[in-house]
Amino acid sequence: MISQVQVPVSVFQIPYQRATEIAKLLLSSGANPEIIEYKAGCSALHYAAAENNQQICKLLIQHGANPGLRCSQGFSPEAYARASGHNELADLLHRIQHHRYPGQKKRTQQNDQGWCKMQDATTQRCFYYNRLTKESTWDRPAVMSTHIDAAPHALPRKSSSTSDADKEARFKAESEREALQRQLMIVQKRLYKAQIRADQESKQAAQMARVAQEADARFAQELAALKANPSAALNESDPDALQAHLARLTAQFEAAKQQELDRLRESYERQREEERNDLERQRHEERERYHQELEIRMQEMQRLEHQLAREVKEKRRYYNEVEDLKGSIRVCARVRPLCAEDQRQGLSEAVEVFGNNIKVTHERKDKSGSKSTSKTWTFDKALGPQRTQNDVFEDTERLVQSALDGYNVCIFAYGQTGAGKTFTMTGTPEHPGILPRAASTLFATMQTQRELMDFTVELYMCELHLDTLVDLLQEPSSPRSEDIAPNSSRRKALAVKKDQFGVVYVENITIVPIESEAELINRVRVGVARRATDSTRMNDLSSRSHLIISITVKGESKVSGEVTSGKMTLVDLAGSERAEKSGAVGQTFKEATSINKALSALGEVINALSTNAKHIPYRNNPLTQLMSDSIGGNAKTLMIVNVSAAASNAAETMASLNFAARCKSIKNAATKGFETRELALLRKEIAKLRAANKVTPPTKVSQGALAHSRGLAVK
């Protein structure tokens, strides 16, 4: 524990102010001020007195240091101070010692350890004084104990108000102590084993010495016998007998030598095996300890990562809620990486994404030379080339829930041709886009609410091609059209209308009821296949029309009878393009002109809304009429602006981002569409009566409009 830590002597060998701070930190953390330094038997107070450090002396005494404590040579801190010529500090220690331990007037009893019982002349209270160590205490000491063992120096633990710096220092000291303890245990184990080996070797050496002594004794005895009777030795010195005796001695010596070698070899092998096992065990223990620490740190890192992800998601949700309350159109910018053709041509990147910011650098040349222009935009979200389809869908997921709650929701993709709009909206089977992911989320959420709500889902799809709306879900056998080929001029044009609630619908368009996610995906795939496309220089599969997908979700509460109607509109705008870049001629040029005309009308609406103009020119183009309830209307709208990273498209990229920045300033007023149970029942009853009597509604709202009215379903 830290209470056994002594204030180190090295503290007094560093600058005065720093030494005081370190001593104060250690003492306030519970260090024992009276631990004796093992070499000279001195405490920290002895060294502080010798160095004339009054502040540390006072600090040590305040934390329980005994000014009368003596070193191994019998000298007190006061004696150290006087020996060093610091008489002022010595007098101070003398006064503190006699002030702390009251006057001793009356000796009453003495024991065999130098302790005697005294009585205070002022308070008449008994205390105990040691005439050998000059210590005194109010409590009766044990016969064989000293003042150090009695623990008057023990300090109380720090209160709960410990500062963060002290806690950090204590934690660091504890960690270092634990590491040193582990190292000490390892060293102690090794020392213990070394001692065992040394004892074994000592025993072996003693045995060998004893054998050598016995051999020397026998040799000395034989030598003495020869000296005493040399004639007998000569008589007995028969060559054969001597040869036999020599052979016997040689055999005994070889046997003893081999036995000793075997014993030494066995001992060596056993010792080496033990050391190998010990080393392997230590390695295993270290490896296990490191693995445990690594696992703990990995778990902590994962916990922190999950916590960070939750906090980021929560922060994003709160931000989105604030933006919804403001009614702002939320804008997400996505950068398409360089395609294979761009890389083959060696084009450089002109777009940089950091955080929610996107920076574009435009290099252009004119007569005066090369000029560089850069600009930075900040959006609700900015996704670099390395981000995935799932990253795009994160902010879209909450809009699906809004549609289920009865809100009008719109998600539209805008950008230059070839910038990745269609990939973002529909994607591929390997990388599904917003539409298939939204369909999956929609039906999964509906499934979780089946016990409380009854839902119905309807779908219609159309494209704006050459300023004409075309129904993409109309079957070939339908009498409305003779040919539904994508580029056919005979397809029936549709008209954009608004119902009595201000919700946009397309008159006489095919509305398909949807029962499952798979059916929705298949219907959309069929409609997308009928969309007008063509090949240009900038895109092998360029969309030549604006695509509008509308999903209506109606729900009726099984508890309150409330009927909600929400609409989710997904718009894949055709890309703006320049004829000189795309190489558009003939029919492709006409389509490019129509596309740019619709986008120009959309830009006029955005400019009017961003400047709070009194008149908003929605009726200038069918596209703006279709999006009138999504831009500046009552919808929750998310705009995804797709841009190219190639430097050759920097001008178009800057234009797209400027357009998106203007969209971000537009305020919508999202409202929830719902009806009470009574109103819904009345509407159904009126519809039945009119159907029975073949009476048409007295309003200008068509059956297609009624299909999109809030809470009203046409059967």
Image: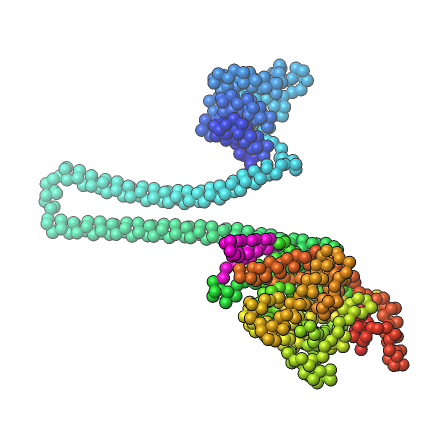
Q: Tell me the residue at 63%/25% (across/down).
A: 139
**Split into 4 quadrants, where in the image is the N terminus?**
top right
Question: Is-magenta flag for residue 367?
Answer: yes
Q: Quadrant of residue 615?
A: bottom right
* Colour setting: rainbow
Whether residue 623 is situated above or below residue 199 in the rendered picture: below
The image position of residue 133, as x and y in percent, is 53, 21
Give the side of residue 219 with respect to residue 167, left or right.
left
| Residue at the front extreme of this rendering | 367
The image position of residue 429, as x and y in percent, is 59, 72
Q: Quadrant of residue 330?
A: bottom right
Q: Tell me the residue at 54%/31% (across/down).
A: 22
The residue closer to the viewer here, 495 or 619, is: 619
The residue closer to the viewer here, 349 or 237, is: 349
The residue closer to the viewer here, 249 or 74, is: 74
User: Which range is magenta?
Assistant: 347-376
Q: Tell me the residue at 62%/33% (across/down).
A: 156
The residue closer to the viewer here, 650 or 393, is: 650
- Predominant secondary structure in magenta? strand
Q: Tell me the residue at 19%/50% (across/down).
A: 250
Give the side of residue 60 with respect to residue 234, left or right.
right
Whether residue 491 is situated above or below residue 138 in the rendered picture: below
